[in-house]
Amino acid sequence: MTVVGPFGLSVRDQALEADVQAGLVAVEEGLLEATKSEVPFITEAAQHLVRAGGKRFRPLLVMLSAQFGDPYAPGIVPSAVVVELTHLATLYHDDVMDEAAVRRGVSSANTRWGNSVAVLTGDFLFARASQILADLGPEAVRVQALAFERLVTGQILETAGPQDGRDPVDHYLDVLGGKTGSLVAVSCRFGAMMSGADETVVDVLTQYGERLGVAFQLADDVLDIASDSDESGKTPGTDLREGIPTLPVLRLRERAARLGLAEDLALCELLDSDLSDDARHAEALRLLRAHPALEQARRDTVRYAKDARAALAPLRECDAKAALVELCDAVVHRAG
């Protein structure tokens, strides 16, 4: 039994391990090739986050989902490059919106080169992903376009906030379905679709990916509060500082409205204050780390991971399915 991919995923079958490892190596080569430009500065900026590493969570899902058809089909590696390029592009844009200073343990592109370069580099990556997609056929273009629309819609909904009378937690989970679940779902869909798997299998894996993607982001929400920068590669409490209401904060506000406890109301008031002040920010993190709202967010993460696991039930038993199940457990483990 060896370890591959994010979170120390263990693959028990040697043939599967070899396929996954070879696929991920090919994806890495494809990412470097896709981010080259005749302009050296563009190459440097576009490869900034590629070379910083990352979990390659989405390409791994492409490789595992391809095991339900022909895992050597020619469209599999390019489709994995597409989803990772799209993901990387959104990171460049997210860091500008969040004014983040650190990404994957290195200075963010906006910190290093400014917001304009970071945004345009993200656009460059989207353009390169589109070029690859064009060679994968009209159905692949359509699938990616719909996912990208959902991704952007989720980001807009997050920025706009819930409509009057809408439960903020329900709104937020819808946001995550668009922002994160859509692209993770496409990763599974592309792997199965490009491998020629049965349409029923494609649909099952797409549902799995959607639920796993939400669980993955909820785990990130927990990590944003609970981890330190060495663990996550990002500055702790980035969303908190920017006033972005992640699930632990939403669960806190929900509890404060329901119970009216003085300590909950005081913490909400602190979160509404200027958290660009380092002392206030540190105090808010300290209090949230000890608050029941963080544990509630962990339980929400577990629930989505269990839903993802349940979605896999119709698939035949095999090592690839076992690895997908283990990913559900790994996401939960990330959240503590």
Image (tube, rainbow, N blue to C red):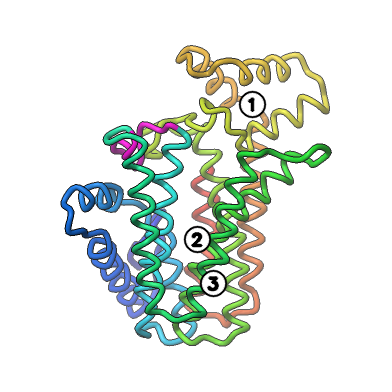
Q: Which mark is residue 143?
A: 3
**Range of residues picked out in magenta:** 99-110
Q: Is residue 202 above or below residue 328?
A: below
Residue in the foreground of this view, choosing between 110 and 271: 110
Relative side of 128 to 316, left or right:
left
* Labels in figure, total: 3
User: Residue tagged by mark 2?
Assistant: 327
Q: Position of residue 317 (x, y in %)?
A: 55, 80
- Residue 201 quadrant: bottom right
Which is more N-terminal, label 1 or label 2?
A: 1
Q: In the rendered view of the protein, which quadrant contains the N terminus?
A: bottom left
Q: Position of residue 258 (x, y in %)?
A: 83, 28
Residue type pointed to by label 2: Leu
Q: Residue at x 43, y 44 (%)?
A: 93
Front position among marks 1 and 3: 3
Residue type pointed to by label 3: Val
- Residue 304 quadrant: bottom right
User: Residue tagged by mark 1?
Assistant: 291
109 in magenta? yes
Residue in the foreground of this view, choosing between 327 and 121: 121
Separation of residues labelled 3 and 2 (CA atoms): 24 Å
Q: Position of residue 161 (x, y in %)?
A: 68, 38
- Residue 23 quadrant: bottom left
Q: Which mark is residue 136?
A: none
Relative side of 245 to 123, left or right:
right
Describe the element under mark 2 as helix, strand or loop.
helix
Separation of residues labelled 1 and 3 (CA atoms): 41 Å
